[in-house]
Amino acid sequence: MRRLLALLLLVPLAAGAVPNAAPPRAAPAPRPLALDVTPTCCAITFTAYAFGVFPIAGSFGRFEGRLVYDPGDRAAAHAEARISADSLNLDAGPIEADVKAQHFLDVDHFPLILFAAAAIPGEDGAMLQGMLTIKGVTRPVTLTITERDGRVTAEAMISRRAFGITARPVLAGDTITITVNAPLPR
């Protein structure tokens, strides 16, 4: 009888059961990640192409934004950014005042460049679709997102003509690459 009782106690243990053990707890749901986009940790840069070939790099010195991403609910993700258009800095000094003038960004009448996104589509999260407003014109834009070395980069190519910026079409190419670089949220 003792052997039978011992055997009955050992069978559940051999199968992985522990008498009087609490059931395993479910893993906690992933919590939303939030990233504040500010000049202290992030960079917003752009590259335009003179004559459509020669790169002209620039950046913005004043901006603020926020990205909220919930791995458990992709539809709840959202992002927004506000960039001070007059904080534009160019490596090509004399051109800077021209780009800020009325025939390009017109920073006196349109002081902000805005971006807003309401969701991250797709399964891999490698794209962020939103609306970009430059010089009072709003257009859809898709940012491609990559991660490397603890940083996340979002990049989009836009047509300046799509935003009504048509001055100097030969000198200043139409395509502009916009890049946001930030630390990965923890």
Image (cartoon, rainbow, N blue to C red):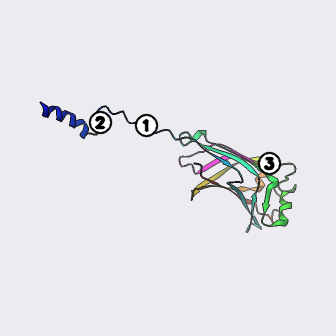
N-terminal label among 1 and 3? 1
**Residue in the image at 76% along x and 63% along y:** 173
For label 1, the residue is 26
Say if residue 176 shows up in the picture.
no
Disc 2 to disc 3, how far (Cα)? 63 Å
Q: Specify the principal SS of the magenta part.
A: strand
Q: Nearer the viewer, residue 24 or 112?
A: 24
Q: Which mark is residue 112?
A: 3
* Distance CA(mark 1)–CA(mark 3): 46 Å
Viewer can see residue 23: yes
Mark 1, mark 2: which one is toward the viewer?
A: 2
In the rendering, which numbered label is found on residue 18? 2
Viewed as shown, does residue 118 lie left or right of 58?
left
Identify residue type, mark 1.
Ala
Which region shows up in magenta?
114-131
Residue 166 sits in which quadrant? bottom right
| SS for callout 3 | strand
Between 70 and 134, the one nearer to me in the picture: 70
> In this view, which residue lies farthest toward the bottom?
54
Residue at the far left: name it: 1
Nearer to the camera, 115 or 149: 149
Q: What amino acid is at disc 2?
A: Val
Few, some or many C-alpha atoms within 10 Å of disc 3 (few <14, some 14-19, many ≥20)?
A: many
Element type at marker 1?
loop
Q: Position of residue 99 (x, y in %)?
A: 83, 59
Image point 75% across, 59% down: which residue? 59
Q: Earlier in the sequence, mark 2 or mark 3?
A: 2
**Marker disc for residue 13:** none
